[in-house]
Image (tube, helix red, strand yellow):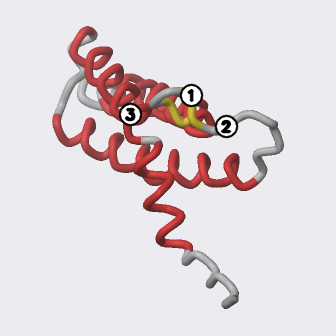
Amino acid sequence: MPEPLPTPLIEIFLISAFMGSVTYLVSIATLAYALKRKHFFKWTYFLITAVITLFLGNLCALWVWLRWSFSFDILYGSLFLPGIVPYTLLPALGYWLIAVYAFKSEK
């Protein structure tokens, strides 16, 4: 029986992005709602924050996933449990940075 080949890192990154897509979409929709509610919404800030959140959140989720030592599965329905914390904290950090720095300099 042949030995299985190791999975390339790009495939692991894509699997993590696919599994965390629902969690990511919920967090980005919440960020857009919060920015529109406070009248801080600008497409450039939003898109930059969304892309940074995608990459940093995926890396953090991969780090948690690799060290997952619990006996239950990493998916709870359509929520990717290792991605909940990064995809919650990073948009909140992006919201704070946009609200404090980007719009403070315009006034």
Instruction: Decide: is 59 above or below 44.
Output: below
Marks 3 & 2, CB-CB < 8 Å contact: no
Which labelled disc corresponds to residue 73? 2
Marks 2 & 1, CB-CB < 8 Å contact: yes
* 60 sits left or right of 97 in the view: right
Circle 1: element type: strand
* 97 sits left or right of 102 in the view: right
Instruction: Decide: is 83 above or below 31.
Output: below
Residue, x 61% and y 53% (percent of image)?
A: 62
In front: mark 1 or mark 3?
1
Q: Position of residue 47 (x, y in %)?
A: 25, 43
Front residue of 88/103: it is: 88
The residue lying furthest to the bottom in this view is 2
Tell me the kind of residue under disc 1: Tyr
Separation of marks 2 and 1 at Cα, in angstroms: 7 Å
- The quarter of the displayed image where residue 102 is located: top left
Circle 2: element type: loop
Which labelled disc corresponds to residue 22? 3
Tell me the kind of residue under disc 2: Asp
Tell me the kind of residue under disc 3: Val
